[in-house]
Amino acid sequence: MQCGQSAVAGLISNGAMIRRLVVGGLIGDGQSVAGLSVICHVTFPSVLSSPCLSCLRSSSSDDYRQWCHTCTIITGRHPTVMHRASSNATHPKKTILVTGASSGIGKQTALALAAQGHTIIMHGRNTRKTQEVRDWIVERTGNRDVHAHVADLSLMNEVARFAADINAAYDHLDVLVNNAGGQFGSTREVTAEGHEKTFAINTLAPFLLTNLLLPKLQRSPSARIVTVASESYRQAGQPILDDIELEGHYSMARAYGFSKLYVWWLMRQLDARLKAAGVRNVTVNTVEPGSAATALQRESIRKSPWMLPLIILWLPFIRTARHGARTSVLMASSPTVEGVSGEFWGNMRRKHINGKWISADGERRIWDYCERVCASYLTDVTQ
Ligand SMILES: NC(=O)c1ccc[n+]([C@@H]2O[C@H](COP(=O)([O-])OP(=O)(O)OC[C@H]3O[C@@H](n4cnc5c(N)ncnc54)[C@H](OP(=O)(O)O)[C@@H]3O)[C@@H](O)[C@H]2O)c1
């Protein structure tokens, strides 16, 4: 069946399916993206045209997630379109590491970059899941040069071990996409190493990994560091720089928002330091994917059910993971942004940043803090 108005009739006649999807969407039973999309279609019928019922029935939820998005539906594309590896002059082959590539935006980023024909080093934290996603990418793109690695990035010990593995296994690295990220609940959690979890995964890990891989990146004729942040920093309020790990000021919104603000600041610092050191062959940019329906969003609803009404209001603006990956892919591989560095991009464009979020003092303090915390791992790295 093709996307079309007949799908609406099918959907409406199938009350059981709607119920299953809506309930699935609310309780996060694995159908949540489909469920949320259906609520969206039912709630905003005048804005959205019909969902592709065929995709929903016959494909995995990933396919649905990829294609049953407002724009996709409006443009009428069908999910049977496959990616095919196409290394060519537009995308000279690069070696690209994507962290958090086992799910959501990172998975779509790795898929799109594999489809361009690059060597993909995909990172996940679960061996089986990461291998399965690797096989899925190979199958869909025909690119066999995709390699799975596993590490828990909430532990700096593991980040250092992972960086050592990458340094040993690959003779060069052209692009690092720091995509892995997490959001936790309303109670502050700490890692076995004693760090607030959100800060550890979203801020410390990209700081340490980037620094440990920097010598390898510097060997590339033209290297790029792309870090996935979030506009959520705007909702977190004023940074609390004398309590960076929020021992006394924890809230979910602060932890997530600040972790993303800080990682962006760290990347600005890195860019400034590289420029000051005369390094010309490594660019450093930060991106934000917009709101994308991923496991991260499902988890935040599950952990904070009070957010549900807000999420429902926000539904028309929630994009697919594939859409969320577009700016990461652009900044990782497009020749059009060659040489661009020190910027914040979103929705395929350079973002205008309100000066109130920039703080040279804040950047230095966060950098110094992370450097202090990671000092034992950074001894061999020239900074
Ligand atoms: N979705 C949004 O609306 C949105 C908006 C703004 C920014 N972002 C950012 O986009 C990035 C990707 O998120 P997403 O939405 O695609 O979420 P996601 O589907 O949950 O993907 C997160 C990825 O990070 C991995 N990960 C999580 N914790 C980890 C850990 N401790 N060690 C190693 N890997 C870990 C996950 O592994 P598993 O597969 O094992 O879970 C997964 O591969 C994140 O940095 C997020 O903050 C997302």
Image (spheres, rainbow, N blue to C red):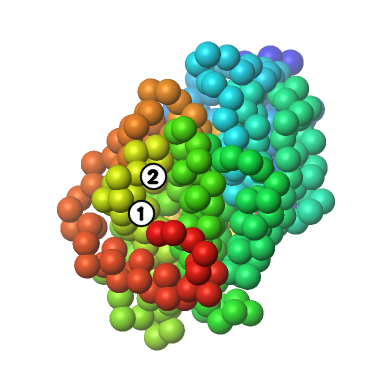
Q: Confirm whether residue 14 shows in the render.
A: no
Q: What residue does disc 1 label?
A: 270
- Horizontal side of residue 148 vs 314, given as left or right: right
Distance CA(mark 2)–CA(mark 1): 7 Å
Q: Nearer the viewer, residue 221 or 96?
A: 221
Q: The C terminus appears in which quarter of the rendering?
A: bottom left
- The image quadrant where one finds the N terminus is top right
The location of residue 313, given as percent across then percent down, is 43, 48
Using the image, tell me which numbered label, if any, was put on residue 70. none
Q: Is residue 381 visible?
A: yes
Q: Amino acid at mark 1?
A: Leu
**Vertical position of residue 179 compared to residue 320: above or below:** below
Residue placed most toward the observer, 186 or 130: 130
Compared with 108, 274 (above or below) is: below
Q: Residue at x 41, y 41 (%)?
A: 282
For disc 2, the marked residue is: 284
SS for tag 2?
strand
- Check disc 2: other Cα within 10 Å, few if <14, some if 14-19, many if 20+: many
Amino acid, disc 2: Val
Query: Image point 46% across, 37% down: which residue?
Result: 223
Q: Quadrant of residue 51?
A: top right
Q: Is residue 217 left or right of residue 338?
A: right
Element assignment for label 1: helix
* Residue 121 spot, x, y in % from top left: 66, 41
Please identify the quarter of the rendering in which residue 41 is found. Answer: top right
> Which is nearer the N-term, disc 2 or disc 1?
1
